[in-house]
Every structure is written in C-alpha cells, then in structure tokens.
Amino acid sequence: MGDVDDSLARAIEHTLLRASATPADVDQLCEEALRYGFCGVCVNPAHVTRARACLAGSVLRVVTVAAFPLGANVAAVAAREAEQAALDGAQEIDLVAPLGLARAGELGSVTRFVRAVRAAVPSLTLKVILETGYFPGAELESVARAVLEARPDFLKTCTGFGPRGATVQDVERLARAARGRAEVKAAGGIQTAAEARAMLAAGASRIGTSRGVAIVTHPDGVERH
C-alpha cells in the first residue's frame, strides 16, 4: 500500500451503488472508508442500516440515494424514500432531480419536487443530482438555480449511470450558479487523483467515487480499468 493522500481522502465519499452489491461488499466498503479516512460511504438504501452499524462510533457519514438513478419518481415517493433512509440511519441523501421535467423546462415543478424532499428530511444533508450530461452550459445553470430555490445543501453532477460523467466545466458551472448558497459534489467517472484534484480546484468540496482507495494510495496516477 502506498502513502495515503489525506487531503483527498477527507473529500471522498467511498461509493458502492452497484445493484449486485452484497452485504460483504458493504462491509468491505466501510472497512476501507475507516482505514483510509474517507468522509463517508455512499450506498443504496437497502444497505444503510448495515453501513451505519459498520461505522458506529466513527465520524464517517452514511450517504444514500433517492429517486435513483433515473430521476423519475413522483415527489411523494422520493420524500418517503428519504424519510425511511433517515429512520435507517442515513445522514445524507443524494436525490436525483426530476430529469424529464428539467429537460422540458418545467423548472417550477423541479423546485417543488426538491422542496418536498427537503421538507421530509429537514435535518439531513441534501444533495441534488442534476445529471449534467443532459444539460448544455446555460441550461444547466438554469436547472441549478431552480434546484437551489428548494435550499439543498449541495448540487451534485452525475449519478454514474447517465450519458457521461462529471467534467471540470460542470463543476465550475454549478459552483457559479450556487454562489455560496450550496456546496458542490463531483461524481461520475472520477478515477484518478488528478481528476479529483481538478474537480476540487474547480469548486467541488466533495468527490463521489468507487475508486477512492486507488485515488488516495496512488496520488500520482492510477491505472484505469
């Protein structure tokens, strides 16, 4: 094992959102997060209780998802997902914005959707995923502003299941739209320390990646798979 890049580690949400993930995979994720000093783990809702138990007594955060990965739930269902995740021990929710409504320009409906989830879990950290690959520059900033009206804590780039991953330009646009009203989480296709650092330099404060161990133990570059 190489030297760990602690500054990167503290920004990383160690992520496992594969549908095929087993309880043993979640245990390993949590063990790695503890070992390398990540800020937390991001798991599917079915694994929140297990992750919280694995991380008991630590300061690491348990993050889960809602309306994931399609952004195609109705608001009441997404809100109920978030409420259940809170009961199970999640501290943060990564919510996919209603992508069809956003693409149609129905931005008031986007705001109301996010606001319903925000109201359901007012004490949890709420990150809203915009799936940036669907929205060219100016359009992305318009969607971001609509989301910000609902007072999330973060804007997030991608699910990792969309048309592409995050780019530095995405992060810059979201940071510009947020203007101190929210933080930015970069996620989707981030595989190297150089990519993670570029996202942080562009304005992100969190990095979501399944490649966290490789990133922090090979800070001068990792082999892509």
Image (cartoon, rainbow, N blue to C red):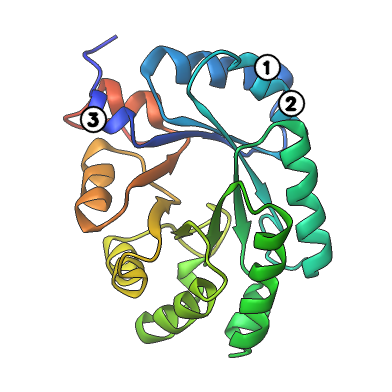
Numbered label tally? 3
* Along the viewing direction, whichever of 56 and 188 lies nearer the viewer: 56
Gap between marks 1 and 3 measured at Cα = 26 Å
Q: Are marks 2 and 1 in contact (CB under 8 Å)?
A: yes
Residue 215 position within the rendered picture, expressed as x and y whole percent measured from the top left? 31, 30
The amino acid marked with disc number 2 is Thr
Q: Is residue 97 left or right of residue 139?
A: right
Q: Which residue position holds label 2? A: 49
Mark 2 neighbour class, 10 Å CA radius: few under 14, some 14 to 19, many 20 or more: some
Quadrant of the rendering where the C terminus is positioned: top left
- CB under 8 Å between discs 2 and 3: no
The residue that disc 1 covers is 53
Residue that carries the numbered disc 3 in the rendered image: 7
| Quadrant in the rendering for residue 170 | bottom left
Please name whichever residue, 172 or 178, is drawn nearer the observer in this view of the structure: 178
> Is 86 located above or below residue 127 in the figure?
above
Kind of residue at badge 1: Ala
Mark nearer the N terminus (1 vs 3): 3
At 65% from the left edge and 48% from the top edge, which residue is drawn?
65
* Mark 2 → mark 1, Cα distance in angstroms: 6 Å
Image spot of residue 176 (x, y percent): 29, 72
The residue at the point 35 percent across, 40 percent down is 191
Residues packed near mark 1 inside 10 Å, few (<14), some (14 to 19) or many (20 plus)? few
N-terminal-most mark, 2 or 3: 3
Front position in the image: 12 or 216: 12
**Residue 162 in the image: above or below residue 9:** below
Toward the front, the furthest residue is 123
What is the secondary structure assignment of the residue under circle 3? helix
- Local secondary structure at mark 2: helix
Quadrant including the N terminus = top left
Q: The disc labelled 3 sits on which kind of residue?
A: Ser
